[in-house]
Image: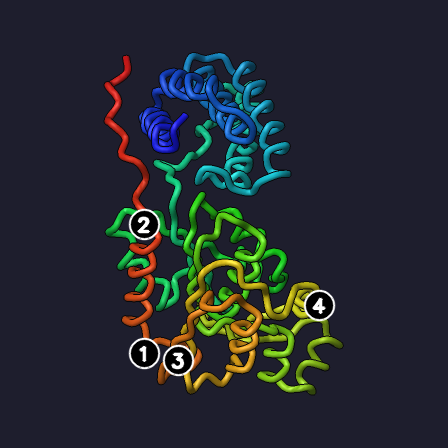
Amino acid sequence: MEHDALYSALNTGLCLYQQEHFFEAHEVWEEVWLEEVGRTKRLLQVLILVAAACHKQKTGHQVGTSKLLAKAVDALDALEVGALAWLGFDIVALKLEAARALGESDRRIRDPGAAFEPPKLPHEVGPDAVLYLHGFASSPRSFKAERIAARILPLGVPFERPDLDEDDFEHLTVTRALRRARRCLHDRTLVVGSSFGGYVGALLAAQDERVSSLILLAPAFGLPETLGELFGDAAMARWKEAGAAPVFHHAHQALRAIGYAFIEDAAHHPAIPRARVPTHIIQGTEDAVVSLDRIHAFRRAAKPDLVRLTVVPDDHGLTATADEICRIVLETVQLLGLTRPPLTPRPPTAT
């Protein structure tokens, strides 16, 4: 099936699903499923199972609901092995929702009065997205994230900004942040990463072809060395000995512990990732955290003209450069031709 037609059918089904017209959503997705192959076909099978389960629930067939949801969870287990995100769907989140609904359905078999909520699905999906990755001890609601969101969201282009801490800052690692970021990838993704998020974004781009371009804001290349220079040898030694250390978390405006596993895990990743896609780096002249030498090392290792560097009179936070950053992000969105999800004709009201 043609690319736009596939997404249009997915969104037609999602629109029906949100209206609780589960049988009609099932029919739309099944028609597409017959034409697809591979991972796309397996994802459509999951959507069909979920819609069928919700239809069973709506018509009072609780045992059938649980059987179908159990099949959906099993199918998502297999799908997650090869991809954490596909066609704009977060496979991990979808599996968690299906498993939650399965538990509620099983309880209703024992207690018909127990609550049941259908698995939450996105309202729409599309091939393109902007993915914002926040910095260390920051959040997806940071100043820069909010400024960029305010410029992107009116365009209708999906704007993803996951919490890389996942409500567990103490056990944050580069590996875990990479996995969380990968769950947000679309077919064509512009990744905007700040500091730690810039380093994670560069690693992600080197590993996944769905990253089309990078905008890196003071990226923390050479992460263990960068933190060592920031905190000093004595503090790093105490951190290692204690197993955790307090750092100021900007989102909480308070000290929060971070485990030394953060440093140990970072050592298993390339200090200077391989540049694979067009990359624009914005770096401040007054940055006391990230060394410009590591930025130059990233550029030297890249193919000619692949990496562009803009040096601005600003510090590591780049807050004074927010307007320029937004301009660069919008310019890159237009250059890549990123668009809103394919328009979906409003489905007729189902009976």
**Residue 105 place in picture, x, y as percent:** 53, 24
Sequence-wise, which precedes: disc 3 or disc 1?
3
**Of the residues under marks 1 and 2, which one precedes in the sequence?**
1
- Look at the numbered disc 4 and give the secondary structure of its residue: helix
> Which tag is nearer the camera, tag 4 or tag 2?
2
Whichever of callouts 2 and 3 sits on the residue coming sooner in the sequence is 3
Q: Residue furthest front?
A: 304
Helix, strand or loop under label 1: helix
- Percent x, y for residue 265? 68, 64
Label 2 crowding class (10 Å Cα cut-off): few <14, some 14-19, many 20+?
A: few
Sequence-wise, the earlier of marks 1 and 4 is: 4
Depth order, front residue of 40/173: 40
Residue depicted at 49% across the width and 12% down the height: 61
Q: CA distance from mark 2 to mark 3?
A: 26 Å
Secondary structure found at label 2: loop
Residue 337's label in the rendered image is 2
Instruction: Find the distance from the CA under tag 3 to the CA under tag 1.
Output: 13 Å
From the top left corner, tell me how far across and down residue 25 is, in percent.
Answer: 38, 21
Total labels: the figure holds 4
Residue 118, located in which quarter of the rendered image?
Answer: top left
Where residue 264 is drawn, which disc sits there? Answer: 4
Q: Which residue is mark 3?
A: 311
Q: Amino acid at mark 2?
A: Gly
* Cβ atoms under marks 4 and 2 closer than 8 Å: no
Front residue of 207 and 245? 207
Judged by depth in the image, the label closer to the viewer, 3 or 1, is 3
Mark 4 closeness class: few <14, some 14–19, many ≥20 residues within 10 Å:
some
